Image: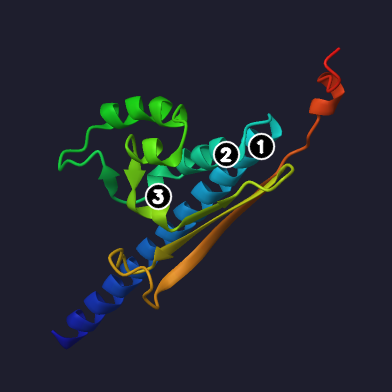
Amino acid sequence: MIETVIAVLIISFTFIVLFRLSRMLTGKIMLQHAAMRVARARTVGLNEFMCVKAGRVATIPVAGKRLWPEGDEFDYGEELARVPIYMGTPNGAVANGVLDYEGWRRLRIDPGNGTRSHVSLDISVFGDTANPSSLDNVRLEGKASTEANYTLYLNDQGR
């Protein structure tokens, strides 16, 4: 019986560690994707606020609990319908009235002034989202850059 208890504890611990590592890997992949979306948005000439919104939308899968609109039932269709409305909002106050997530408060997006972008998010390894300053937080980062070829086909002189 003691051997079984020890084996179950070791297997459970291994499973929990693998689950947490997979969560961090998923977060890293999503932040890389968000950084690429931000870099692309900057490359095609969108302003900084549009770049931030593009990065936020790309991180929805790892953004945690949806704060707005509130509701216990998860309606994927409603959430999907709100994304284009969110992208069309003119400022942060209106944007937060369309979609808001818990993780977006810890998300930092730097669109840069060229074609490089940096996105970072502090996540809790053990899932303590109520205490973002806890010692188990890990900062995940995503970086991306694109080439700015717009000068080859856009005329800045208005001709």
Q: Residue at x 47, y 68 (%)?
A: 138
* Alpha carbon distance from label 2 to label 3: 18 Å
Circle 1: element type: helix
Separation of residues labelled 1 and 3 (CA atoms): 23 Å
Rendered residue at 41%/31% (across/down): 86
Q: Nearer the viewer, residue 88 or 146?
A: 88
Q: Which residue is mark 1?
A: 42
The answer to the question of whether label 2 and label 1 lie on touching residues, with beta carbons closer than 8 A, is yes
Query: Whole-Å distance between the Cαs marked 2 and 1?
Result: 6 Å
Q: Amino acid at mark 2?
A: Cys
Please name whichever residue, 109 or 65, is drawn nearer the observer in this view of the structure.
109
Q: Which mark is residue 153?
A: none
- 76 vs 113, left or right, is left
Residue hosting label 2: 51
Image coords of residue 53 (percent x, y): 49, 39
Q: For the residues carrying marks 1 and 3, which lies nearer the camera in this image?
A: 1
How many neighbours does mark 1 have within 10 angstroms: few (below 14), some (14-19), or many (20 or more)? many
| Residue 137 higher or lower than 85, as above or below | below
Q: Amino acid at mark 3?
A: Val
x then y, percent, for residue 5? 18, 81
Q: Nearer the viewer, residue 91 or 21?
A: 91
- Classed neighbour count for the residue bearing mark 2: other residues with Cα under 10 Å, few (<14), some (14–19), many (≥20): many
Give coordinates of residue 16: x percent, y percent: 32, 68
Mark 3 highlights which residue?
Answer: 62
- Numbered disc in front, either 2 or 3: 2
- For residue 93, what is the image quadrant? top left
Closer to the chain start, of discs 2 and 1, is: 1
Of the image marks 2 and 3, the number of the one nearer the N terminus: 2
